[in-house]
Image: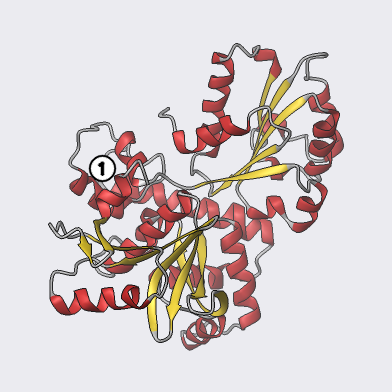
């Protein structure tokens, strides 16, 4: 197992702090492995193995624990008396009312608690009220390109070539170690997609029309980075013979977000400094899953790059919106604390007309925050009157960002 330092650093920072650590993210994105890595770190710190209780509630051996009373008693029987215990509880949402048992164990003060779950409803409003002020969420995404390079069996691979493979096959942690042939990877990615769709969305939400949900996923995957609305989506699906309503589409979009399949980028009015409720953009969590769904085809390169940059900004801890400045668009407004950055993403700006079109929105932003043009070009020009010109591969590999 290769360490995912981005997330391990966060776990170390919160270790032994009076907070419940909740690790969320797409199924098969590496949450369970992260807990295994953290368990090894605890053992290296000389924590007794009997004080580490690591359970995965998708194990058949734990199938009988399905409510909070059983969970509480099961854990109490295993916590060593008079010793601090570390609870590493994987896919905890399988247990009904789990939060009551966890809240009680936390209040008793003997346990440092780490949870994972594959659905954002793990922290629904009711649960977050019960655990109010007592938890911190750590969201795990598939491999960043920097992590992908570290996971490759041949770590001396040319970054530009490896990036094209990353765009093609995505960053699910299982991918770099597989034979890099289309049929093998297509089979694995299709299996992940089918499991996420069936277990984390259709079964959990008792979806009445799985075929309609599948059509919606394909529509969103084919329109990453395009402004959409529920009425536009329902209108398109109706025109394709899938009669539906905006309410149904809203519900399905929520389910897809809760399962971490798609992320919503709200429109941000740069001049008015507020988020808008219309014409949002959706980005898929992994490009390999998109390609397995739609076919490994060429085209839409600009929006694919947009998707990769959007996810990278999320990894770096930014809140990311799609910028609007009058009639002009800025791909991303990235905010963190008192810091704000603007990003424009384009495959290439080697011709002057394209360059001016991409620079225009950034040039019109009235503040002095950082402005960056990201492209696949390797250009000796590093700055356009204060707007940084950065190669996308270099941006993704930058450890100091």
Q: Is residue 17 above or below residue 346?
A: above
Q: Residue at x 41, y 40 (%)?
A: 173
Q: Secondary structure at mark 1?
A: loop
Number of numbered callouts drawn = 1
Q: How many other residues sit within 10 Å of disc 1, few (<14), some (14-19) or many (≥20)?
A: few
Q: Is residue 73 above or below residue 78?
A: below
Q: Is residue 339 left or right of residue 83?
A: left
**Rendered location of residue 191, percent (x, y):** 45, 49
Q: Residue at x 21, y 44 (%)?
A: 159
Mark 1, residue position:
180
Q: Residue at x 29, y 39 (%)?
A: 149
**Rendered location of residue 22, percent (x, y):** 65, 42
**Rendered location of residue 357, percent (x, y):** 25, 79
**Rendered location of residue 389, percent (x, y):** 24, 61
Viewer can see residue 116: yes
**Quick one: 122 or 184, which is closer to the camera?**
122
Q: Is residue 220 left or right of residue 299?
A: right
Q: Residue at x 55, y 36 (%)?
A: 10
Indicate the colouring scheme. secondary structure
Q: Quadrant of residue 69?
A: top right
**Quick one: 340 or 37, which is closer to the camera?**
340
Q: Is residue 74 above or below residue 240?
A: above
Viewer can see residue 177: no
The quadrant the N terminus occupies is: top left
């Amino acid at each position: 197992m290769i360490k995912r330092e981005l997330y391990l650093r966060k776990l170390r920072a919160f270790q032994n702090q009076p907070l419940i650590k909740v690790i969320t993210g797409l199924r098969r994105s590496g949450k369970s492995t992260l807990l295994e890595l953290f368990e090894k770190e605890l053992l290296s710190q000389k924590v007794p193995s009997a004080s580490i209780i690591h359970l995965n509630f998708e194990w058949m051996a734990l199938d009988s624990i399905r409510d909070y009373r059983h969970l509480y008693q099961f854990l109490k029987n295993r916590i060593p008396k008079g010793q601090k215990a570390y609870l590493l509880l994987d896919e905890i949402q399988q247990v009904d009312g789990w939060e009551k048992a966890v809240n009680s164990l936390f209040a008793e003060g003997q346990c440092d608690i780490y949870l994972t779950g594959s659905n954002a409803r793990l922290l629904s409003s009711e649960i977050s009220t019960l655990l109010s002020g007592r938890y911190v969420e750590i969201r795990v995404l598939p491999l960043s390109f920097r992590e992908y390079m570290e996971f490759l069996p041949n770590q001396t691979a040319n970054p530009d070539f490896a990036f094209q493979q990353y765009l093609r096959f995505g960053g699910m942690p299982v991918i770099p170690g597989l034979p890099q042939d289309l049929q093998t990877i297509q089979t694995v990615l299709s299996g992940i997609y089918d499991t996420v769709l069936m277990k984390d969305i259709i079964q959990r939400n008792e979806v009445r029309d799985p075929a309609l949900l599948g059509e919606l996923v394909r529509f969103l995957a084919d329109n990453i980075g395009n402004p959409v609305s529920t009425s536009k989506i329902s209108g398109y699906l109706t025109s394709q013979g899938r009669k539906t309503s905006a309410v149904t589409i809203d519900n399905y979009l929520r389910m897809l977000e809760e399962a971490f399949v798609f992320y919503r980028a709200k429109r941000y009015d740069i001049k008015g400094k507020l988020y808008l409720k219309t014409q949002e953009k959706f980005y898929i969590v992994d490009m390999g899953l998109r390609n397995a769904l739609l076919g490994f085809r060429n085209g839409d390169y600009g929006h694919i790059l947009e998707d990769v940059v959007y996810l990278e900004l999320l990894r770096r801890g930014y809140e990311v919106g799609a910028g609007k400045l009058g009639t002009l668009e800025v791909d991303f407004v990235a905010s963190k604390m008192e810091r704000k950055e603007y990003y424009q993403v384009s495959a290439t700006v080697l011709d002057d007309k394209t360059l001016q079109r991409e620079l225009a929105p950034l040039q019109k932003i009235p503040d002095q925050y950082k402005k960056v043009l990201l492209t696949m070009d390797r250009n000796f020009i590093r700055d356009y009157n204060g707007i940084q010109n950065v190669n996308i591969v270099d941006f993704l590999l930058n450890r100091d960002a």
